Image: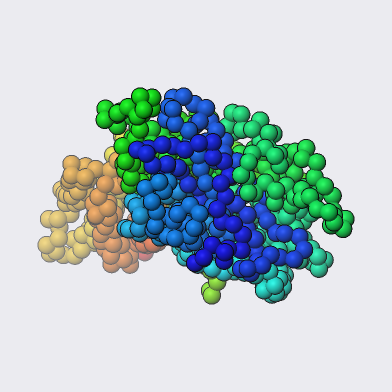
Amino acid sequence: MDRQEDPLPIHHEFYQPGDLIIGGIASQIFFMHNTFSFEQQPGRRLSGEPISVPKYYQNVLSLVYAVKEINENPNILPNITLGFHILNNYFISRMTYKASLSLFSTHHRFIPNFGTHTQKMLIAVIGGLVSEISDNIATILAIYKVPQLTYGSYSPAQNDEIVSPTLYQMVPNEVYQYKGIVQLFHHFRWTWVGLLAADDDKGDTFLQTIIPLLSQNGICFAFIQKLPKRTYTGKLIDSFLEQLEMYPRLIESKANVYFVLGERSSMSALRWVLFLAEYMSLPPLGKVWIVTSQWEFESLTIQRSWDIEAFHGAISFTAHSSQLPGFQEFLQMVSPSWAKGDGFIQELWEQAFICSLRISNVPEENSRMCTGEEKLESLPGTLFETSMTGHSYNIYNAVYAVVYALHAIYLSNLKHKRLVDGRNFEFQSVQPWQLYRFLKSIIFNNSAGDTVHFDDHGELIGGFDVTNWITFSNSSFVRVKLGNMDPRTLPGKELTLNDAKIVWHRSFHQVPPLSVCNGRCLPGYSRKKKEGEKFCCYDCAQCPEGMISDQEDMDICIKCSQDHSPNLDKNQCIPKIIIYLSYKEPLGIFLATMAISFSVLTALVLGVFMQHHNTPIVKANNRSLSYILLVSLFLCFLCSLLFIGQPAKVTCLLRQTVFGIVFSVALSSVLAKTINVVLAFMAKKPGSAMRKWVGKRLVNSILFSCSVIQEGLCSFWLSTNPPFPDMDLNSVDGKIVEECNEGSDAMFYCVLGYLGFLAIASFAVAFFARKLPDSFNEAKFITFSMLVFCSVWLSFVPTYLSTKGKYMVAVEIFSILASSAGLLGCIFFPKCYILVLRPDLNNRKRFLMRKK
């Protein structure tokens, strides 16, 4: 390729105060840089206004400033003056390869890989702005083992085994900023975002990386918009016009957050689309733009008057930068005549300030001559910034990294030094590959106080700044640092953010926007997937009984701990109320009153019987058994009080056992009375063998043996697995039932079963003797009382098993009272009627007369 084919000079000897003399060979640091981008066909200029990006000129000035500082610092490379060359690639791969090869060519002719002993040796290359350019440069430099320091996009060529040793990244790995952006989405709970990227390899790689990452973190993309890749201007306009067909989709999308790959091609295309939409009076696009670190908010010169309102409130992850002391004062010195050999200043000045520096006999129509006194700080921020950008900061650090590596080589070679003309020291022959070891191990603090060093993979150890962009109507803007993304901190804590500083787009009225597929599910509800939709689109289903959701958009409802229960809204767990059958509540008061009343009534009946101790009706059917039965019924009524009140260890041990034993005595008495009646009538027959069984001995034997069996069951129960106080956490929703755990359910039902056996036996015998002829025969009354008793306890079992909590206790108390009252009423009230109201019937003679 001949040098005459270049559309513009690619080699600019911008600033060269002197040569770095190393072993008799002039050696310099070369700087590969994308200073201006000319959208043109090779071989001719564009007609009309030139198209350039003046903002990139700050990157050049950061290099100049770094070299100026180094040359003025006697502690770095003493007695050596540093110079540099700048080459432009115009964002064209062919020009990048040619510029790279020119570094290994002779100084005045393009003859790659040819030089003389006086040829200046290439030590390192700094560049480029976009990853494609860096990769193209790396392809050439890897052959010659020349180190390259990238300063714009992170280059994926780092994974190439051949290129990797030569490549040093002045920007952290992009994976970190993607993780930071995901954390940003989680911070604001944005789950429905639009994705925009250029329709090129970089855009495809971006989408292939970010889509799985978003999905893994519960975030969906509402759409994917491919922006037109950079091409010739004529085709570019046609491509943008095609994109306008998708503009209504951007406007109508429910997503309020758009995530954009900040590569220059993506942002340039987006600026064109927004401009054409405004030109065609389409509705403005009020969204939150989340942009990656490559974006520097630059404009082409023809875009100086374009509105940037759409980007107001944008948030970007930018390369970390600090303001260097003296840099802004240095920028104030820049003017068209400030340095010889600056091949960029004239183009910059004319296009940025819309004036002419050219001296011509025939002035152009409507042209304005530049005064040379114009100030860079007067330009809008989209054309030039006086505060140091992240890319310029990376270039500054890259220059120092190379110089410190050279200085380390210089110090290591001092022991091999030799005098040259008796005045200076000369480097031994330094090869570019010798910098590898020193660059990887280099660590220094720059003038801003930041530490610069690389990891084992040649990647800068550092993070990103989170920046909020506040725009104004004059195409200027302000950067506000909101926080940073530091991958060296604890996982999940890498992102720090100051929400109070954020300025949102004006369409959101300074309220953090929502960006979700549908409204959030409030606490008390959980997300329910919609069939055929992405997982971020869902319905809201109320939590089932016993479960809550205490946050918005919970995937599943959760159970409360056992001692807590859901509130009515099912959005909070509240402590369960401890309940038991208390004397203070109406049910407890009623049951206690009934128990005491029946016990008093039983005592009165006993008193009446004792008062009429010797009367025939009392003496009939064994007076002693009647007294035992009344006492046991009295105790039955009173034992029900053990079931009321807060369960304690003593009451839990006594309530079932006392109830079982006392009831067994009562039923044993009834059984003995019934058997005694039957035997008495059978013994009246002449010659009956039953006479010997009639008497107190049989009665006492029945009473004793039946009671002892129950006492044995209760004793075994208490000695093996006795009842104890317990908390039932699950039976009643929202409440903890303080109860007596029976210990052994089997023993409990054995005790009840034995009582049932006695009751059935009594009922059977009484039913058999109900028609025996005797006015004093109690068999009819006992039959009816046993019928009541069995009915009560047969209904008790299913009722007891179907109730919960304190009502189980109430059911048992009611069964005790009802069955005891049945015995008392059916057996003793007819006799009390005669004793109290009809004493005339209480004599043997009258009964015998009635019998006849």
In percent of width and height, residue 418 lies at 29, 28
The outermost residue toward the right is: 366
In percent of width and height, residue 595 lies at 44, 42
**Which residue appears at 19% of the width and 48% of the height?**
713
The outermost residue toward the front is: 421
Q: Is residue 344 left or right of residue 171?
A: right
782 shown above or below 419: below
512 shown above or below 539: above
Q: Is residue 280 left or right of residue 56?
A: right
**Which residue appears at 12% of the width and 55% of the height?**
692
Q: Is residue 510 visible?
A: no
Of residues 430 and 844, the one nearer the viewer is 430
Number of numbered labels in the structure image:
0
224 shown above or below 186: below
Of residues 183 and 793, the one nearer the viewer is 183
Of residues 434 and 516, the one nearer the viewer is 434
766 shown above or below 321: below
Of residues 77 and 424, the one nearer the viewer is 424
